[in-house]
Image (tube, helix red, strand yellow):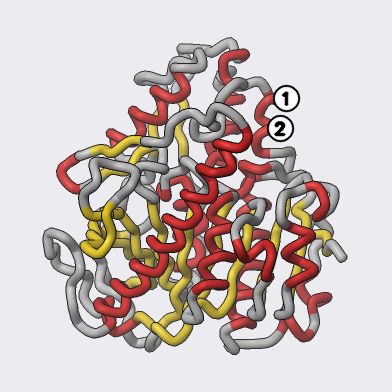
Amino acid sequence: MLVWGFTGVVARAEPDVSQQMVLTLPEPTGEDAVGVVDLHLVDGSRRDSYGAGGARELMVSVWYPAAPEARSPRRAWLSPNMARIYAGSLARVGASTDGQWVFTPGHGGVGADAEATGGRRPIVMFSPGLGMPRELSTAQAEDLASHGFVVVTMSHTYESAATEFPGGRIERNALPVAKDAAEAESQVAAALATRVADTRFVLDELGDIAAGKNPDAAEQPLPANLARVLDMSKIVMYGHSLGGATAAQAMHDDPRIAAAADLDGGLWGSVARDGVDRPFMLISGNAASRADVPGWQQFWDATRGPKFHFRLVGAQHHSFCDNQFVAAPLVAAQRLPAAAAAELVGTIDPQVSLALQNVYLRSFFNTALGRYDRLLQAPGDLLHPDMVPVP
């Protein structure tokens, strides 16, 4: 399993310990200010097979358009605890980052009032890659929220490298190292089933919020107007890597999800065999064709709804998360060879990569939700030379 994306490559770097790395997320491009609240949710109906057998616990972040006059502290990109764990992951493969990097805050105002004058907003669910925490997809969530979506990012506890709960409690990855390919496939299948159950539970909890309830385990106050901006009739989902498979399978299983997008993730489970009957978009990295990735071609042939596949030129698997904004500073500080960075996050400029992903995601979701019809009716309007349609 990749350790947050850098296993096996950082150790080849020769670090310049005199150079401090300042890691910064790009500014959101939309007109809306962004608010965020972290929620601790407990599913009392499920026993957690990963942990100590108690009720299933999750941490989610809800990103939403905030009132322009709201004044709130900005949420950390990575908390000090999560940053230390990230640094420790790199240290285990030979890189030293202690005291040498700074994660600047993100752009979400913690607990800021939601902007209610625009009415109810579509909900976008997000699931990260296997072992990845939700924090490493912050740039995308912030940008989508700045364009009028409510984005709900999930950390899948005990499968994520680390999940931080209120008070600083950390639950680490509990998956054993797979002995062989068959065991690895079994782990993926179990993780996918758990992730889909997580998604459906979180959707239920969002419905409770929209109905005026507070599902947070500690009943922390929710942002003002949050219940008023949740449109439970307009729900879509996307994910990176195994999160993309989660989005597809969750749409397959749950009729509340109107469309799904997969960012460079193989497809597993019954959805790979059955396909889907609602809009689906795949954005891939360096794969030459659908035949190169598990489940893609089988799913494509079975899918009956509108479907789109674009290849992002110059992208690699970790171009679809915040690792693309970490790799460049690591290279500049001589902590990651340029060739190794290209293997991880490709050669595409990270800002261009994020902008293209988000433009296509927004257009796809807006089309699927009936807000406008550009992508489905005239895909040529959105074609960019770095987004190559795959027939």
For mark 1, does the 10 Å Cα neighbourhood hold few (<14), some (14 to 19), or many (20 or more) residues? few
Q: Residue 281: give x, y in percent of width and height.
A: 68, 68
Q: Which residue is mark 1?
A: 339
Q: Quadrant of residue 161?
A: top left
Residue at 46%, 45% in the rendered image? 136
| Horizontal side, residue 138 vs residue 321: left or right | left
Q: Residue 192: give x, y in percent of width and height.
A: 50, 54
Answer yes or no: do the residues labelled 2 and 1 have beta carbons within 8 Å? yes
Q: Which residue is mark 2?
A: 342
Residue 67 appears in view: no
Q: Residue 39: give x, y in percent of width and height.
A: 25, 60
Identify which residue, 291 or 391, lies in the foreground: 291
Q: Is residue 53 above or below residue 97?
A: below
Identify which residue, 229 or 352, lies in the foreground: 229
| Horizontal side, residue 121 vs residue 308: left or right | left
Secondary structure of residue under mark 2: helix
